[in-house]
Amino acid sequence: MARTKSTPRHIAASPSPTSSASPIPHKSYFLQHAITSSALLAFPVGTVVLSSLLPSDPVRTLGFFLPAVAFVQALNIIFTHPGAEVVSKSRVTKKKKQSEGTVSTTILGLMLSMLLTPFIHLVYVLFGAPVTVSVPATFLLSAHTALLALFPLLCAVPLDGETWMQIAALKAPITPAYVAALGTIAGAWLGAVPIPLDWDREWQTWPVTVVFGAYVGNAVGRLIGAVLSGKEKKL
């Protein structure tokens, strides 16, 4: 009696606990960066529109809001860090280790950003910032620039020479942190254009327009980077 061979049925393999997790939807990813951009823009816009603190007293205003900017940036880094962009299905211990690693990376990035603030101050001076006057204002501007441009980058990319050479050569992969850094630099540069004009306006005081340019450029760059990097993930 001949045996009939049964056709094997295709059985879908159940996902293992160690399988790679699915990424967060792009809309949520973009929304997180949009919220951060809005929160950061609230600082320069609010201080001028509501109380004119920034033009009248740049040093006090920049110093007062510096911790708040650091806090907003740290939250954004923690929730949009590459390690946080996936929905983990592994054990709770693995989630805890990943969270601890993200927090430690954020703290390290913040410390390095503050350590690099004097270097940014020097760059501003080389590009025409006052040398002997408005020194506290320039230093605080440098600290805000470090938080906007360097802080997210230091947390998002490896700390090796080759990677940072690619960043300096404008050949790094498109990410919100990278494009936001470029936007911050471009915005600060464009923001300095109205200062020497003979308009005699209070908001032309150094470094009011540079601060505005840096924040607007950062917000625009962050959103553009989120859109472009999201499209690359879909491909």
Image (cartoon, helix red, strand yellow):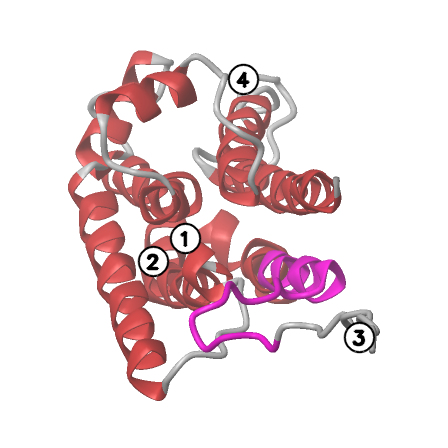
Q: CA distance from mark 4 to mark 3?
A: 94 Å
Amino acid at pointer 3: Arg
Q: Residue at x 39, y 41 (%)?
A: 153
Residue assigned mark 3: 3
Magenta region includes residue 30: yes
Residue at the spot 83% in from the left edge and 73% down from the top edge: 2
Q: Nearer the viewer, residue 9 or 13?
A: 9
User: Mark 2 sits on what residue?
Assistant: 60
Magenta range is: 14-38
User: Crowding at label 4, few (<14), some or many (≥20) Cα neighbours within 10 Å?
Assistant: few
Q: How many angstroms separate mark 1 from mark 3 (CA)?
A: 93 Å
The amino acid type found where label 4 is placed reads Pro
The residue pinned by badge 1 equals 57
Q: Disc 3 or 2, which lies upstream in sequence?
A: 3
Mark toward the viewer: 3 or 2: 3
The residues tagged by marks 3 and 2 sit, at their Cα atoms, a distance apart of: 90 Å
